[in-house]
Amino acid sequence: MKKLKLLLAPALLLAGNIAQAHSPGEHAKVYFKNLQDRQTVTAPYKVQFGIEGYGIVPAGTRDKRRHTAGHHHLLVDHPGNLDMEEPLDHSKNCMHFDQGETEAVLDLPPGKHTLQLLLGDEDHEPTDPPLMSKKITITVQ
């Protein structure tokens, strides 16, 4: 029995590490550094992405960093029908920052727009649990 426990210990340790892969801790968060809900901006304007408790790496990163980091996706006027089990789409409503960018210059048309950050893994799938910012509304002049 002792031999069996010794043989199973590495497998159980590995299984525990795999369960934590792509799983931000409870204190991890993404947020907008320079924008607030209901803010008015003049186009074009810079949007800065903040992150705490998790890292940023380019999309496609396959080394061990992929378990503790991801890359930003900016949801712009997104209808909200995301499947958190599938890769995020490439569309006008879902901007991918594949190189690990932490800011972007946006030039949205005048009017009200919603913005939300969502972190994705190396394959553009949301982390589990999803690491999402609060959805904010801005007005572009």
Image (cartoon, grey):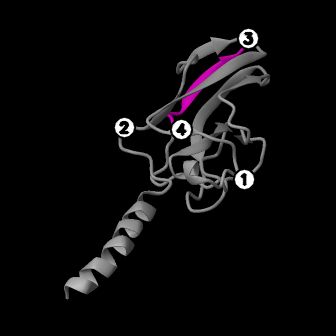
Q: Is residue 135 magenta?
A: yes
Which residue does the numbered mark 4 point to in the structure image? 55
Which residue does the numbered mark 2 point to in the structure image? 27
The image quarter in which residue 111 lies: top right
Q: CA distance from mark 3 to mark 1?
A: 28 Å
Which of pointers 2 and 3 indicates the residue nearer the eye?
2
* Amino acid type, residue under disc 3 in the picture: Thr
Observer able to see residue 126: no
Say which residue appears at 35% left-offset and 66% top-offset: 13
The image quarter in which residue 78 lies: top right
Q: How many marks?
A: 4
Q: Which mark is residue 89?
A: 1
* Amino acid type, residue under disc 2 in the picture: His
Which of pointers 3 and 1 indicates the residue nearer the eye?
1
Count neighbours of disc 2 (C-alpha within 10 A) and say few if under 14, some if 14 to 19, many if 20 or more.
few
Q: Tag 1 or tag 2, which sits nearer the N-term?
A: 2
Viewer-proximal residue, 1 or 43?
1
Q: Is residue 131 above or below residue 4?
A: above
